[in-house]
Image (spheres, coloured by chain):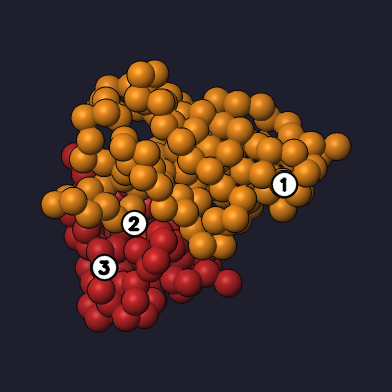
Chain colours: A red, B orange
């Protein structure tokens, strides 16, 4: 059972906008930054969003993050086939805690 | 850009100690300002943070693994290492090393990741 709660799956068609939610509590998301990672099949996680809504250089602006209270969301606009991956949220809560991951399928 | 590379045995026997090393390039551990972490991922499962170390040697571990984990640093080789004792099959996982995102003296979550290495615990 993960400390942060994500839906196990999400899907969308090319060009669509999809959002992935991440729910936590006052001790993690409510009081610390949220991070999002993308993990393509067979590869290491890659940082997608840091400090709630910042994109590392090289990450397309199709990806955006937001946070409100004890929940956060990752939005992907203009969905592309190469976005098919597992997505994880993370935050600090006496250690780094992760969500269980959301498998995004591009239909 | 910082690059990290894990190395170590891919097979460890039950009850023994798992030992991995992370070699850092493109940045110096001894310059400070960042925490260096270990994270693992059980096959087909999610991510689990193990702990981190600062260049000075100060560490912080996941409370759930603390009794079995030791993370150390060798600044002369620009490496940091993980030891996990008394392993069982439940420790079979891909192990990643990472450099954390830090600002103003606080660090929050991994930023740069190594490619990971699979460690299997089996006799």
Residue B54 found in image quarter: top left
| Nearer to the camera, B76 or A100 | B76
Looking at the image, the residue that sits furthest to the left is B104
Residue at the spot x=85%, y=37% of the render? Answer: B123
Q: Is residue B26 above or below residue B56?
A: above
Q: Is label 1 in a helix, a strand or a loop?
A: loop
Q: Using a 10 Å C-alpha cutoff, classify the residue at mark 1 as few (fewer than 14 neighbours), some (14 to 19) or many (20 or more).
A: few
On whether disc 2 and disc 1 are found on a single subunit, the reply is: no
Q: Is label 3 in a helix, a strand or a loop?
A: loop
* Quadrant of the snapshot with the N terminus of chain A: bottom right
Q: Using a 10 Å C-alpha cutoff, classify the residue at mark 2 as few (fewer than 14 neighbours), some (14 to 19) or many (20 or more).
A: many
Disc 2 versus disc 3: nearer the observer: 3
Residue at the spot x=58%, y=39% of the render? Answer: B83
Report the residue marked by disc 2: A36
Chain ID, mark 3: A
Measured in 3D between alpha carbons, the distance from the residue under mark 2 to the one under mark 1, in whole angstroms, is 32 Å
Residue B26 position in % (x across, y down):
27, 22
Looking at the image, the residue that sits furthest to the top is B77
Measured in 3D between alpha carbons, the distance from the residue under mark 1 to the one under mark 3, in whole angstroms, is 33 Å
Residue B43 position in % (x across, y down):
65, 49
Q: Is label 2 in a helix, a strand or a loop?
A: strand
Instruction: Say whether marks 2 and 3 touch (CB < 8 Å).
Output: no
Q: Is residue A25 above or below residue B85?
A: below
Look at the image and tell me whether residue A42 can be seen: no
Report the residue marked by disc 3: A32
Q: Is residue A101 above or below residue B95?
A: below
Residue A102 position in % (x across, y down):
48, 62
Q: Is residue A86 above or below residue A94?
A: above
Residue A73 found in image quarter: bottom left
Chain ID, mark 2: A
Report the residue marked by disc 1: B86
Chain ID, mark 1: B
């Amino acid at each position: 059972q993960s400390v942060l709660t994500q839906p196990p799956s999400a899907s969308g068609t090319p060009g669509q906008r999809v959002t992935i939610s991440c729910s936590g509590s006052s001790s993690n998301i409510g009081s610390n930054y949220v991070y999002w990672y993308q993990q393509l099949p067979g590869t290491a996680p890659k940082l997608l969003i840091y400090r709630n809504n910042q994109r590392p250089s090289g990450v397309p602006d199709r990806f955006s993050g937001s946070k409100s209270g004890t929940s956060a969301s990752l939005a992907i606009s203009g969905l592309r086939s190469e976005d098919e991956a597992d997505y994880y949220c993370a935050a600090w809560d006496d250690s780094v805690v992760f969500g269980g991951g959301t498998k995004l399928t591009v239909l | 850009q910082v690059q990290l590379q894990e190395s170590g045995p891919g097979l460890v026997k039950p009850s023994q100690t798992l030992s991995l090393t992370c070699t850092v390039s493109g940045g110096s551990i001894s310059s400070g300002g960042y925490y260096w972490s270990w994270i693992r991922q059980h096959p087909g499962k999610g991510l689990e943070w193990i702990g981190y170390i600062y260049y000075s040697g100060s560490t912080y571990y996941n409370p759930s693994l603390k009794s079995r984990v030791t993370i150390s640093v060798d600044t002369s080789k620009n490496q940091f290492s993980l030891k996990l004792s008394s392993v069982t099959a439940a420790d079979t996982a891909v192990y990643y090393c990472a450099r954390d995102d830090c600002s103003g003296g606080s660090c929050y979550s991994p930023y740069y990741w190594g490619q990971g290495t699979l460690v299997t615990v089996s006799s």
